[in-house]
Image (cartoon, rainbow, N blue to C red):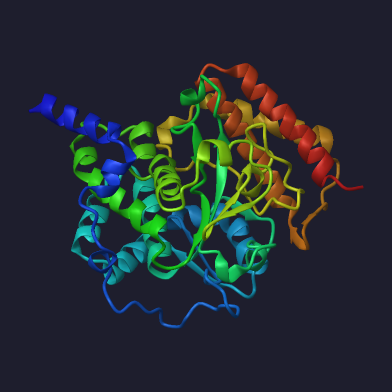
Amino acid sequence: RAVRMRLRARWALARPAAAVHAANAASLATLLHEPLALDSPAPSLPARSIPLRIVQTCSQEQVKMFRSFMASWRDENPDCRYQFYDDDDALAYVRSNFGPQVVKVYETMPSHLPVLKADFFRYLAILAHGGVYSDADTDVLKPVANWSRPFDPSQVGAIVGIESDSIGRKDWKRWFPREMQISQWTFAARPGHPILHDVVNRVLVKSDAMLALPELNDTSVMEWTGPGVFTDAVLDYLATELHVDWRTELHRLRQPKLFGDVLVLSTTGFSPGMFGRSESVLHPQALAEHLFYGTWHPVDYYTPVGSTASLFTLGCLCSVSSESTCTHTNGGTAGTFLRRFRSWFTTGLSLHLFILRGNLASGLRLTLEASYKYKCAYVRT
């Protein structure tokens, strides 16, 4: 029986994207309770496809850690409806808006890996009512209402950003679940968009096999609810519905490009200053910055090495900044020095992760590059 369970799980991970898409694809009406309506509608500009709604979620224990970042999304987007969901709120939302199949899978996701529910919830929330989703450890760099520019917002049904472009690299599997990976820490879509419908179906199809695994690891998370399954849904939609050869069209993309109703951003859009091919957070294309607090990992994932790495990072910060009141400005939005300070701490954790993976040289290079970047971008005399 144990062998059958392992083979079944391995088969689910290895199935082609088209097979997962076709198997047991529940209709949108089956997934959702109808009619769908918020207590009050999300604000919307005239002739706009994606509602001006911002969704974020984390546990109540993490609210204090991310309070300043979440405040940036509210403060910099006064024309958007901001909705925060803690764990209890998210469960209530799923129960009130979705049918028994979705609720059952959501409730049975292992509690020791809360990231599974957080991942699934983001897809469900945007599928049902549309808007922008962004992780709690992100910093908004441009007003959401301007994200579709220079395209007509009425023609944009989804906004996604390339997280990493590793086409041509033989070692991409060491770092990412997909060779061309789409960010799922930040994305936007209209209600009922086929991409979100597809990714929810994929999560449902894989649930039995994943729950049968004796242990869920990082790879399981990436494939079940994380960037692996989200990337598959996005690229499959581009390829099958819009006939886009994403290997050539998205490779080395430097400008936002509209494919049908899907606006694809370069790596600078949601991953500025990361992975070698993106511009800095000051670039006009940079819309949001992910600070990688990594709270989805188990608590025992971190070791004392992390503290050492963090101290190293803070030392770099002290060496480049003697100012205690500096602020930064991006496209008319302002943030606090505290947010920058916390991003440095996060860089220390990134160094720690590289150390754990046996790649100290890359970790040191990352930290030194960050030191230079923040010195140039944020320290103002």
Count of marks placed on residues: 0
Looking at the image, which is closer to me, 171 or 358? 171
Image quadrant assignment for residue 319: top right
Residue 275, percent from left and from top: 62, 33
Looking at the image, which is closer to me, 304 or 152? 152
Q: Residue at x 73, y 27 (%)?
A: 368
In this rendering, the answer to whether 93 lies above or below 246 is below
- Outermost residue on the right side: it is 381
Q: Does residue 172 appear anywhere in the picture?
A: yes
Q: Does residue 133 appear anywhere in the picture?
A: no
* Image quadrant in which the N terminus is located: top left
Left or right, 365 with respect to 90, comes to right
- Outermost residue on the left side: it is 1
Residue 358, percent from left and from top: 53, 16
Residue 257, percent from left and from top: 62, 52
In this rendering, the answer to whether 63 lies above or below 53 is above
Left or right, 6 with respect to 325, comes to left
Residue 312, percent from left and from top: 69, 27
- Outermost residue on the front side: it is 243
Q: Residue at x 69, y 62 (%)?
A: 150
Looking at the image, which is closer to me, 139 or 133? 133
Image quadrant assignment for residue 47: bottom right
Left or right, 380 with respect to 77, comes to right
Looking at the image, which is closer to me, 350 or 317? 350
Left or right, 130 with respect to 65, comes to left
Q: Residue at x 41, y 39 (%)?
A: 228
Image quadrant assignment for residue 258: bottom right
In this rendering, the answer to whether 376 lies above or below 77 is above
